[in-house]
Amino acid sequence: MRKVTVPLGQRSYPILVGGSLLDALGRHTRAAGLAGRCAIIADANVAPRFGHIVAASLQAAGFAPMMVTVPPGEKSKNLRVVAHCYDQLARHRLERKSFIVALGGGVTGDLAGFVAATYLRGIAFVQVPTTLLAQVDSSVGGKVGVNLDAGKNLVGAFHQPRLVLCDLDVLGTLPDREYRAGLAEIIKYGIIYDEPLFRRLEKNLDRFLARDPKIVGPVVARCCEIKADVVGQDETESGLRAILNFGHTLGHAIEAITAYGTFLHGEAISVGQVAAAMLSARLRGFAPAEVDRVRELFRRAGLPVALKFSAAQRKRLLEAMRLDKKVSGGEIKFVLADRIGAAVWGQHVPDTDVHAVLDALAANA
Amino acid sequence: MRKVTVPLGQRSYPILVGGSLLDALGRHTRAAGLAGRCAIIADANVAPRFGHIVAASLQAAGFAPMMVTVPPGEKSKNLRVVAHCYDQLARHRLERKSFIVALGGGVTGDLAGFVAATYLRGIAFVQVPTTLLAQVDSSVGGKVGVNLDAGKNLVGAFHQPRLVLCDLDVLGTLPDREYRAGLAEIIKYGIIYDEPLFRRLEKNLDRFLARDPKIVGPVVARCCEIKADVVGQDETESGLRAILNFGHTLGHAIEAITAYGTFLHGEAISVGQVAAAMLSARLRGFAPAEVDRVRELFRRAGLPVALKFSAAQRKRLLEAMRLDKKVSGGEIKFVLADRIGAAVWGQHVPDTDVHAVLDALAANA
């Protein structure tokens, strides 16, 4: 088992990465100082698969868990489902010292984390991510929230978990498409922060896709380390943390205009990162050969690297980007890269460059 | 104009108390470091009365305000109205550096504050309380939130405003019933923290009810000072801050079982405080003569001091109290007083004492 700490003073917390961890959840939760009643929030796919293991482990450690099941998928990350969760917690008398276990992928973690951030003005929560994407990204760092019709993650809070537990065994049952989607965030860490990680992925992609634990374990832990490092420096995204959004401005917009669900998040940001690399080449001297390396790695991972939009879709895409949380003074701010391993944030990108890159994405599609 | 500071380090903020302040809102908001777009959230009663003054003052100071109108009353402090506000903010492209002006009573402040706490994971907000109750209590201290069917304020956050502006002139148009309801929180400060304030109210109640600015101004400022002092010591209610809930455990339960709206909050906590004084006499040696002083001051203020419940209502009342946010280990925790001016929190009260006091309240009704 590997342990990474997110360094946030009194609110620091451990990320545990390893095999057979679901069984040990109760013990680690107790070690994190939690006690009493809790609610496990999981979607209708994950609950029957892992709910009983998690509940049993919590019970064995002296907790009194209850189960809250929510509908699966990005479409259910909304305020109606949040309200359903609140009602369940109230019915089961959760108290200020109770806590929530978010068991599932990024959607469940964001949703359950937002419920924890706001129920009784905030109660503790534990992240038990069951997808590759959630393990390396969304479960770490305390960003929680839900979507509005107007855009993704427009409502939310910063609320750090007390523990993140990444059981590598659960990745074994993940559908291939979801596993590959998780790779999009992993490749991102290489591009924005860690050139050696990028090279390691280029070299070992096949083993990673074959889910070889000898490569998956250290890579997941390394991604958590990078995220912990960035979040520790800039918890509420006043600066540096924005680099984690590389590829996300376009990615979120693609998700928004396709009504959430056509593309998995990882797929949308794969296209978004290829676009961001092309914009970086136009505006930051990112080498064209590096754009090719980026595109090639996503392609080998089985992720989309091109996309064609109708004129109407393109208009809606630009509108959605203008609703992005990173907009300031009406201007969309992009994360770009100077080279693989070094990102810059808060970059102004003229509309003409956005259109040129959308043209290029369409030409390759 | 009086100025009180809520001492919270980098998040400290001023409370301004005085006449003709609505006109000066723009200037003070700018001095608080805010800029750009903003949304004024007000209910359908307050918006036509003060909305244009506030909007004009903000415009004159260079801000670009838009108006979001919500239905009036405690019943509208819910997640559906919150969702309506989010949609308006998204439509008008509010950004992370935009802010919200909460213009109205406690309901509007709590609701608009929760919207500010969660929109784009939290944006700045300014409180412009227009009721006596909101000026002395709910606008200060950063507790924001909405009700669930299961109970009051069960969903929320701690999110401090950047400025609180109490214009005493707006109190002139407040309906008598609402003005008196505000007095319930003012009397509370005397009971829990400031015996001289309690005596001053006993002596000058008629002038206060006549809305004599020479007494209202200093009393409002003194209440803000007490609240600032308490919040500065214990922002997130891990201890001391709980004393501000004197009378609220029963008060909130009364509001909950009467479907919000039968009683104003101030009326419900008036009964609640009389009950808390009686419990204090049973359990903490609070002098019976002091119970009489407390009851008499609420009575003179025109507030309810007795109430009869049917057996079914009483059952629901106790259930509602068990859903109170202050419940710990299944046990309701009360705030009691040792004497006028000195409160204690986290007190266990046996059910038999609760029933005895409910009997006494009914006997007086």
Image (spheres, coloured by chain):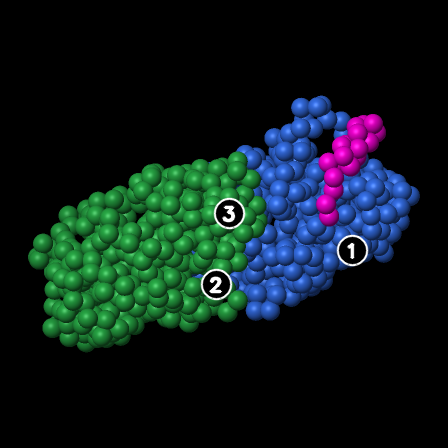
Chain colours: A blue, B green
Q: Chain of mark 3?
A: B
Q: Tell me the CA gap for discs 1 and 3.
A: 39 Å
Q: Chain of mark 2?
A: A
Q: Chain of mark 1?
A: A
Residue under label 1, please give it: A193
Q: Is residue B336 visible?
A: no
- Magenta-drawn segment: A347-365
Same chain shared by disc 1 and disc 2: yes
Q: Where is residue A298 shown, x and y percent of the image?
A: 81, 40
Q: Which residue is mark 2?
A: A35
* Image quadrant where residue A36 sits: bottom left
Relative image position of residue B30 (x, y in whole percent): 50, 56
Q: Point out which mark residue B63 bears.
A: 3
What type is the residue that disc 1 sits on? Tyr
> Which residue is at a point 11% across and 68% down the rendered structure image?
B292
What's the magenta bit mostly, secondary-structure-wise? helix
Q: x, y percentage for residue B359?
A: 13, 58
Label 2 crowd bin: few (<14), some (14–19), many (20+), radius 10 Å: some
Q: Is residue A159 visible?
A: yes
Amino acid type, mark 2: Ala
Total label count? 3
Question: Is the residue marked by circle 3 packed among few (<14), some (14-19), or many (20+) residues within 10 Å?
Answer: many
Q: Amino acid at mark 3?
A: Phe
Quarter of the picture holding the N terminus of chain B: bottom left
Tell me which residue sits at (34%, 48%) in the image: B104
Looking at the rendered structure, whether the residues under marks 1 and 3 are on a common chain is answered as no
